[in-house]
């Protein structure tokens, strides 16, 4: 039973890792893709090819309704997936992965372990459910990673905006400057600010553009930032003073989050210490004494 659970865990972990690597490109591939777009290189990308392969299966699990008003679309934006191909890949994976996982579990249990009956059916159902929820888990991990990236870079962006505003730049020019400066340290935040700046240049109001920024990122701090700038613009108050207070609050939140993560380290280290470190220390300390006791007691017991 332990071997079976370990093999299923390895299979599920391998499937999750493969799906994560398949859906999330590396930083190098994103830069190469951006260079291809800038140079006007033609040819289908790997996302388009994968979407074309998954398209016949995506329609089987795609929910009905307006996709533009779907909460899942906002989660895709929060994860950084803005292409239409991402939806096809997501729902295609939700259709194919349960079949792949269930077939792999059936072949593994029936061929290698000769399982049958209720046990075989139960594990096949569990594998199918794991395959169905794998895309949800990968999407949640992508959203979490991108939100953390934006949250960690947002205090620096607020400080830089404060410097730009106090130097005499307008809000639009300050957003452009921040986008250029934050491309290396926080690419996700630079991308979102660039989209906000493009939306304002295209004729959208500042309030609507900032509200869309908060919706795309899904962060409470960005929503507060959008509300603060909107109210400052509406009531004519000083944007510099508001930004100074806001950046101080963001730095305090980032410091509190770092202290919270540091406080969790002893609790997280408790399980590895109990399972791996303490037994090794006990064997090193008590091992020689146990050997001496055995060598002393065995002759006495044999003589008795």
Image (cartoon, rainbow, N blue to C red):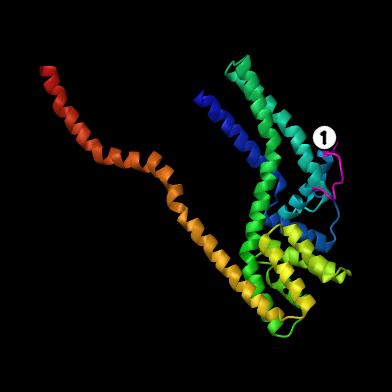
Residue tagged 1: 57
Count of numbered marks: 1
Which residue sits furthest front? 235
Q: Position of residue 253 (x, y in %)?
A: 57, 65
Left or right relative to 71: residue 249: left
**Crowd band around label 1 with a 10 angstrom C-alpha radius: few (<14), some (14–19), many (20+):** some
* Residue 304, quarter of picture: top left
> From where the camera sits, is residue 46 visible?
no
Q: Is residue 166 above or below residue 47?
A: below
In percent of the image, x 83 and y 39: which residue is there? 63
Q: Is residue 111 left or right of residue 67?
A: left
Q: Is residue 71 above or below residue 192?
A: above
Single out the residue that lies furthest toward the right: 203
Residue 245, x across and y down, in percent: 62, 75
User: Is residue 40 shown above or below 234?
Assistant: above
Q: Which residue is drawn at 29% across and 39% down?
A: 282
Q: In this view, does 53 lie to the left or right of 119?
A: right
Residue 59 position, x and y percent, is: 85, 36
Q: Where is residue 76 in the image (x, y as percent from the top left)?
A: 75, 50
Left or right: 11 in relation to 205: left
| Residue 20 shown in magenta | no
For this rendering, which residue is in front, 165 or 288? Answer: 165
> Which quarter of the figure has residue 31?
bottom right
Which stretch is magenta?
Answer: 55-70
Q: Residue 62 lies in magenta, yes or no?
A: yes
Looking at this rendering, what residue extends furthest in the bottom direction?
168
Residue at 19%, 28% (x, y): give it. 294
Residue 156 visible within the image: yes
> Dot 1: what SS?
helix
């Amino acid at each position: 039973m332990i071997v079976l659970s370990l093999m299923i865990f390895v299979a599920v972990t391998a499937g999750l890792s493969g799906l994560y690597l398949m859906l999330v490109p590396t930083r190098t591939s994103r830069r190469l893709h951006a260079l291809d777009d800038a140079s006007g290189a033609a040819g289908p990308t790997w996302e388009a090819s994968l979407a074309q392969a998954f398209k016949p299966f995506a329609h089987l699990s795609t929910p009905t309704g307006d996709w533009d008003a779907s909460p899942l679309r906002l989660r895709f934006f929060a994860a950084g997936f803005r292409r239409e191909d991402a939806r096809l890949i997501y729902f295609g994976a939700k259709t194919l992965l349960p079949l792949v996982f269930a077939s792999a579990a059936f072949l593994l249990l029936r061929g290698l372990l000769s399982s049958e009956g209720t046990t075989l059916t139960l594990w096949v159902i569990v594998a199918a459910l794991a395959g169905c929820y794998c895309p949800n888990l990968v999407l949640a991990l992508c959203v979490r990673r991108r939100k953390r990236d934006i949250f960690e870079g947002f205090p620096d962006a607020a400080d830089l905006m404060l410097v730009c505003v106090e130097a005499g730049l307008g809000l639009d020019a300050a957003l452009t400057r921040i986008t250029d400066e934050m491309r290396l340290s926080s690419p996700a935040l630079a991308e979102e600010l660039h989209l906000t700046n493009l939306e304002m240049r295209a004729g959208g109001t500042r309030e609507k553009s900032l509200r869309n920024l908060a919706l795309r990122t899904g962060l409470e701090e960005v929503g507060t930032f959008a509300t603060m700038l909107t109210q400052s613009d509406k009531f004519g108050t000083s944007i510099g003073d508001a930004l100074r207070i806001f950046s101080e609050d963001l730095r305090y939140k980032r410091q509190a989050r770092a202290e919270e993560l540091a406080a969790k380290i002893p609790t997280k280290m408790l399980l590895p210490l109990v399972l791996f470190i303490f037994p090794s220390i006990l064997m090193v300390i008590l091992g020689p004494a146990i050997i001496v006791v055995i060598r002393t007691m065995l002759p006495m017991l044999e003589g008795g």
